[in-house]
Image: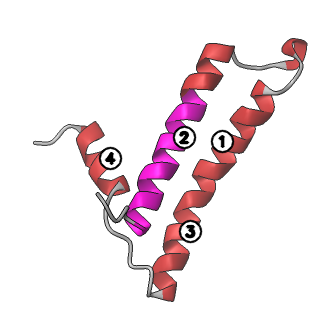
Amino acid sequence: MKRSRVRERERLRAPVETTDPAALAVYAGALRPVVASLRALVEDATAAPSQRVHARAFLRREILRGIRELEARLDAASPHPNA
């Protein structure tokens, strides 16, 4: 039985069919929550310290996690030629 992190990583890196408009629309829809989460984290991180909701360490960790997820999903749609 695979661990949940391994299954999640495989799901994120699953190939994406970019020539099928319906599959591409589903893929883009799956990216929206990631981008929305990143936007909220960045808005919090750039707020005045007295208005910040989360600690800087939490914000940094979660922003980096979101960026890694976006990179993995983009790599699945357009793999690097030397990969």
Residue type indicated by callout 1: Leu
Quadrant for the N terminus in the image: top left
| Disc 4: which residue | 8
Q: Determine whether 65 is above or below 24 in the image.
A: above
Q: Residues within 10 Å of mark 2 (few under 14, many from 20)?
A: some
The answer to which of marks 2 and 1 sits earlier in the sequence is 1
Q: Kindly identify which numbered label has been placed on residue 38.
A: 1
State the CA–CA distance, disc 3 to disc 1.
15 Å
Q: Determine whether 27 is above or below 50 in the image.
A: below
**Residue 45 picture location, percent across and down:** 76, 26
Q: Residue at x 51, y 51 (%)?
A: 70
Q: Which secondary structure, mark 3?
A: helix
State the CA–CA distance, disc 4 to disc 3.
18 Å
Say whether marks 2 and 1 touch (CB < 8 Å).
yes
| Disc 2: which residue | 66
Q: Which secondary structure, mark 2?
A: helix
Verify whether residue 64 appears in magenta.
yes
**Residue 78 picture location, percent across and down:** 42, 68
State the CA–CA distance, disc 2 to disc 3.
15 Å
Q: Determine whether 67 is above or below 58 in the image.
A: below
Residue type indicated by callout 4: Glu
Answer with the quarter of the image where residue 64 lies: top right
Asked if residue 56 lies left or right of residue 61, the reply is right
Answer with the quarter of the image where residue 55 lies: top right
Q: Kindly identify which numbered label has been placed on residue 28.
A: 3
- Magenta span: helix, strand or loop, mainly? helix
The answer to which of marks 4 and 2 sits earlier in the sequence is 4
Asked if residue 31 lies left or right of residue 12, the reply is right
State the CA–CA distance, disc 4 to disc 2.
14 Å
Which residues make up the magenta segment?
A: 62-78
Residue type indicated by callout 3: Ala
Total number of numbered discs in the rendering: 4
